[in-house]
Image (tube, rainbow, N blue to C red):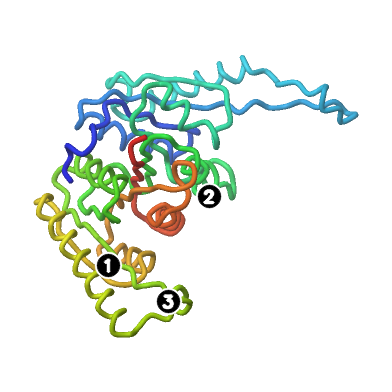
Amino acid sequence: MTTSATALPRHLVVATDFGPSADNALARALALAQGLGARLSLLHVVEPLPIVSAWGDAGSAAWLGVEALVQAGEEALARQIARVPGAGAAGVATACRVGMPRRDLGRIARELGGELLVLGARNERRLGDRLIGNTAQAAVHHACLPLLVCRRPAAAPWREVLAATDFGEAAARAVALAEALSPGARRRLLHVHASLPEATLALVQPDPGQLERYAAAAEAEASQHFDALCAGLPGWTGHFRRGHAGELLMEAIATHQPDLVALGSRGHGPWIGGLLGSLGQRVLAQGEADVLLALAAT
């Protein structure tokens, strides 16, 4: 599993709400795009404002001033390009579209030709309205392309990267993307071998000796698979652990304090469900690192 496992992103799209975290995301994306030789676009999705009559007649609702909102969005995009160092000289393209940001960011970014969607981790413009848990969390549900959520200041490159693998295609893509985006970083690859589910075992009540042999064989197979995987990733240090994936991932984050955490995701929709899908949600909610989430090819 190397960077050849996935095409490198040639077009990065930064979603903006014009707040400080969006400026930071744009600065990070600028540095990444320059390293990759990739194009960069700045996207704002305008959510229309409804007007409903005093009688509450739903049929009389109208969308207020969409053209004016789009024009204001385009002007705000130009101001953001002007205030973020290097953005103007880099020729960043801008796009203002009408839609529901929580639902439509990924789709619109893909329609623009984007191959990586970049978000700021918090919306600091409105009291109590954090991007994580709102727009970014919803973007995770609906994203149809890899997603980078930026928390850390973009002034310095990533120096410590942690990726988790379940041996699946999405995890392979996450590792390949992380490697491409983090030249010069120290990289660690974590696999957690889960214990057999006790509740299920209680139903079948297997022979203890047979169960012990099965568990030992399963762990040996996973360890051999992980060793082979690490052999193909000379720039990565492998960590094979036994136990609960969520707990050990968060423990590894606390121990190594990575700048970037990379995960694959799979399951319901493109994102929700699956081992690493649920872990991605947890890291987004609790971690302090930037988070890179990748999908299996569709």
Circle 2: element type: loop
Residue 63: which disc? none
Q: Residue at x 36, y 41 (%)?
A: 295
Q: Is residue 161 left or right of residue 113?
A: left
Which residue has dot 1 on it?
Answer: 255
Residue 151 point in image, percent of width and height: 38, 48
Q: Is residue 107 left or right of residue 54?
A: left
Quadrant of the rendered image containing residue 50: top right
Question: Is the Cβ of the residue at disc 3 closer than 8 Å to that at disc 2?
Answer: no
- Circle 2 packing at 10 Å, graded few (<14), some (14-19), many (20+), is some
Q: Nearer the viewer, residue 261 or 142?
A: 142
Q: Residue at x 29, y 31 (%)?
A: 30
Q: Is residue 273 above or below residue 25?
A: below
Residue 235 point in image, percent of width and height: 11, 51
Q: Nearer the viewer, residue 65 or 149?
A: 149
* Quarter placement of the C terminus: top left
Residue 201: which disc? 3
Tell me which label, 1 or 2, sits earlier in the chain. Answer: 2
Mark 1: amino acid: Thr
Q: Mark 3, mark 2: which one is toward the viewer?
A: 3
Q: Nearer the viewer, residue 219 or 217?
A: 217
Residue 48 point in image, percent of width and height: 64, 25
- The span from disc 1 to disc 3 (Cα, nearest Å) is 33 Å
Tell me which label, 3 or 2, sits earlier in the chain. Answer: 2
Which residue has dot 2 on it?
Answer: 133
Q: Is residue 64 above or below residue 100?
A: above
Q: Is residue 85 above or below residue 120?
A: above
- Circle 1 packing at 10 Å, graded few (<14), some (14-19), many (20+), is few
Mark 3: amino acid: Leu
Residue at the farthest bottom position: 208
